[in-house]
Amino acid sequence: MNPTHVLREHHEELRLQLQHFEQILATLPHLPPPELARAVREQILFLREDVKSHAAAEEASLYPEVNALAGSPGFNVTATMEIDHEYIAGYIERLAEMRLDISPRKVGEFQRVGWELLAILKVHFDKEERVYLPFLDAKLTEKEIQERIVERMDVFEEAKWSE
Amino acid sequence: MKPTHALRKEHDLLLSRIQAFEDVLDVLPRLPREDMEREVAREVEFLQREIKSHAAAEEKYLYTEVDYLCGHDRNAGVKTSATMAIDHQYIAAYIDRLTALALNINPQTLAEFQRTGWELVAILKLHFDKEERVYLALLDARFTEEEIARRIVRRMEQFEKGTSVELPSEGELLAYG
């Protein structure tokens, strides 16, 4: 088992929920207005509370470790991945705004923005798993990852929830 | 004018063309079959010829410089451009998927072509923004315009034309130390 297995498991859980989001996007045009509004509201809640807060927690705990271990003084090696997070948050807020007056006429636009967000998220997760997590696997033990990253991410996400 | 202005100008040209691709995606469902096939073939050719080769040229010359500037040769750290190179893999795969869909474009396969195209455009816009805000800003801080032209721009142009170009020499790259 890789030292980063807890982080990988968390990604797997999010991936399953994102698959569900993708399935919901496909069914939206067939839903009557009250169900459409409810389905959209539930998905926005998931995107904000799980995806957005996960990204913020990574940026607060995982990325600083990657930067510290990478040893590139004066340069933030995770800078491009932070911009991914910025776009992900922007897409989620755009969907949240569209939710306010969702109607069968506007479902197509909502689907399109949702698909674009999913595409960016899939690439982003893959990059973290293929670049950052193997790097951490090589540099830290499971215990170190638990203490320095996982626990801090948990605390960060809990604090966000209680805000 | 920034030292990387030639690279930024190239991005602007590509972004205008990507915007035109996005506009075509929107009008495709309203086009007669023959026009649809022609537009799709033209867009796929643009993506294959210009976007894919631009990405390959960047990876070979621009990313190599960025990695050395970030000290990739001096530590056992993560390669800075590794995540951006994965973006390129996805971009190439999306383009190949659109090319395969274009071979049998019809009103039934159109929705998939549009969705794939929209996803690719979203990834490309984000990718260009990252290069400009992070990599080009880094190069602006370290190189003169002449150095960028010599070390990156000319090599990328020759590579895209299909001419064999040498990678920066070890001596050139180690001079960053």
Image: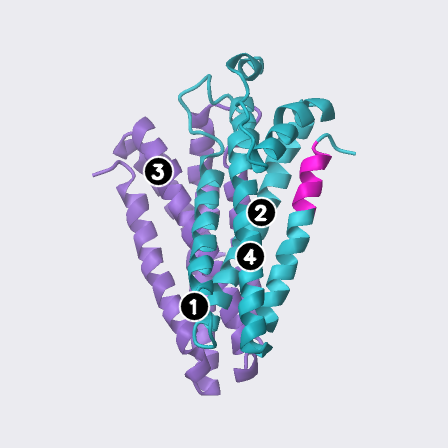
Chain colours: A purple, B cyan
For the residue carrying disc 4, how many other residues have a C-alpha within 10 Å: few (<14), some (14-19), or many (20+)?
many
Residue A48 in view here: no
In front here: B25 or A34? B25
**Mark 3 — on which chain does it sit?**
A
**Alpha-carbon span between mark 1 and mark 2:** 22 Å
Which residue position holds label 4?
B121
Q: Which of the two discs, 2 and 3, sits closer to the camera?
A: 2
Please give the label number shown on residue A133: 3
Task: Provide the secondary structure element on which disc 1 rests.
Answer: loop
Marks 3 and 4: CB-CB under 8 Å?
A: no
Marks 2 and 4: CB-CB under 8 Å?
A: no
Please give the label number shown on residue B104: 1
In front here: B108 or A108? B108
Q: Is residue A163 above or below residue A152?
A: below
Q: Earlier in the sequence, mark 4 or mark 1?
A: 1
Looking at the rendered structure, whether the residues under marks 2 and 4 are on a common chain is answered as: yes
